[in-house]
Amino acid sequence: MFQTYDPPSESGARGDRLVALRAELTRRGLDGFIVPRTDTHQNEYVAPCEERLAWLTGFGGSAGAAVVLQDKAAIFVDGRYTLQVRNQVDTTAFEPLHLIETPPSSWIARTAKPGMCIGYDAMLHTINGVKTLKAACEKAGVKLVAVDGNPIDAIWSDRPEPPLAPVVLHPMAFAGEAASDKIARLQAELREAKTDAAVIAQLDSIAWLFNIRGGDIARIPVTLAFAILRADAAPQLFIDGRKLSGNVAETLGHLAEIAEPEGFLPALDAFSGKCVLVDPDWGAQAIADRLVAAGAKLRFGSDPVLLPKALKNTAEIDGARAAHRRDGAAYARFLKWFTEEAPKGGLDEISTAKALETFRAETGKLKDISFDTISGSGPNGAIVHYRVTTDTCRPIEMNSLYLCDSGAQYEDGTTDVTRTFAVGEPSADMKREFTLVLKGHIGLSSARFPQGTSGAQLDTLARIPLWKGGLDFDHGTGHGVGSYLSVHEGPQRIAKTNKVPLQPGMIVSNEPGTYRTGKWGIRIENLELVSPASAIEGGERPMLSLETLTLIPIDRKLIETDLLTGEERAWVDAYHARVLQEIGPLVDEETRAWLEGATAPLEG
């Protein structure tokens, strides 16, 4: 399952593709084209047949876009990929820019000339995204045009076929609620809101709603499909019938009207005069265009599945806890092996990541890793979302830091954990910065907060110790996590701009870090379950807290105990005591003996 990403090795081949794209644009009467890194469902991970940005540019990250004009081109990535993009993309052909600081819309506004005609694929851009692009184009006197057929597809001669992984039913023991009950619950909400239907485009929403899982997208157990949830009739599910076995087809047939994917857009024509809910942050512009043309009344709002999916029920919470105990035991075995083998030399980023996956696979429960493992040694650890290739793979050297961000997909839960380890003796600077990250992690993990508090309000707690030390990190502090679904799930996040109130049952990550370009990266990540807090003496309001799900030791060798307060030291000791208590009985005697040392109380 572990794979390295090796972008096209010949920059000349990518140059030929850029030339071919420009020729195709000229044939269509276009002066430019926008290439997002997404598919028709706005997925973070996409099928090989949807990797248009990687095919054109060589960039292998999970977020980005390119704009190609006849005389210049730019590629846009966020703060996670500012180093990676320069390693993978020919910067003489594509100017690398920050996706947030200089988004494609602002680049177009200042670069495109009046009278130009720039194309876009309306199935690959959200409604809100197109709104921003149109405003920028109008400002520049440029015409933004939806293309009939993607021009990259026209020149991509060996484009892979769409995936056809079989669909499986997700057991009630893990789902915790029948699909028919979920559908009825959301239909009642639509009726209450006087809405006739809702378009469901997100694949994890469809998987959750119908209690199905698939294998069309790497790392996320979903199936390519669209759905229309109707308030007063059975939902419609548009999915390739070749993926449905007899039992699955029969079960879904009792829940929904099943049709082939090409029937999705035409089915929207039936909603003339009806009120249809579309999520402007996830729904493609082509969906809105089709509904408007049909005479439907558009209602913009959040995907109705998002919040119910994020609020884990008892079965999903029990599954998450079980998955993390299993994952913790596998990781403990890996850590014992790593601490013994790394000082000998011979390990590198790829072999170590493969070893970790092997330990997880030996549980007999691993379905897949939950994302491409970030295995960064030394300076590669400073690349926030580093994806190791055979060309970039570094040995794990003595007196260095190794950062590993990884996760697993089990049928009962999804895990995501980052640990940073010292190989040999860490320097004083390494220990200082690691401890500041740890203080931020503890600050968030220990938080008590009233109902209605958002991730934006909590984000600062993880940054204050780093700010005091003159440090920060250019990514959110945490993201939502699904239940045997996407490792990145909304609507909740721990981030500066996320205003969604945290509610019991939500799972979020807690992952502050700091990154020294050319030297090392440090990140500590646990998953946390939002839960009611125990009563506080003298308090007058009910509070929420974060229950840590991840049960994996933190490298004590990297902790500068003098920088910790008494409460912070108590947190570390209590966390490690819990790791030993819950994971110790699940591992062999040798691993338990190692674990006892790794979780011993802090000294000094």
Image (spheres, rainbow, N blue to C red):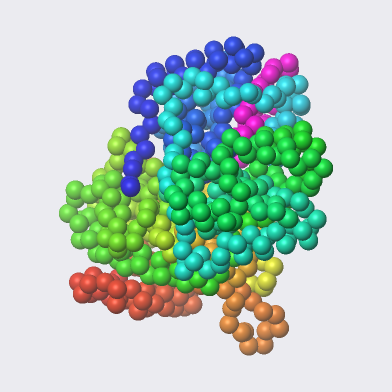
- Give the x, y percent position of residue 385: 44, 45
Residue range in magenta is: 99-127
Viewer can see residue 143: yes
Residue 197 or residue 535, whichever sits in front: 197
Viewer-proximal residue among 308 and 472: 308
Q: Position of residue 419 (x, y in %)?
A: 38, 59
Residue at 29% of width from left, 42% of height from top?
394
90 sits to left or right of 97: left
Query: Which picture quadrant has residue 452?
Result: bottom right
Judge by depth and name the residue closer to the eye, 431 or 546: 546
Q: Residue at x 22, y 49 (%)?
A: 347
Whether 112 is drawn above or below 423: the answer is: above
The count of marks equals 0
Give the quadrant of the C terminus.
bottom left
Q: Is residue 455 visible?
A: no
Q: Is residue 377 left or right of residue 508?
A: left
Q: In the image, is 191 to the left or to the right of 69?
A: right
Residue 117 lies in magenta, yes or no? yes
Question: Residue 115 in magenta?
Answer: yes
When the figure is inspected, residue 318 is found, relative to residue 140, above or below; the finding is below
Give the percent coordinates (x, y) of residue 261: 57, 38
Identify the residue at image location x=61%, y=84%: 535
Q: Quadrant of residue 99?
A: top right
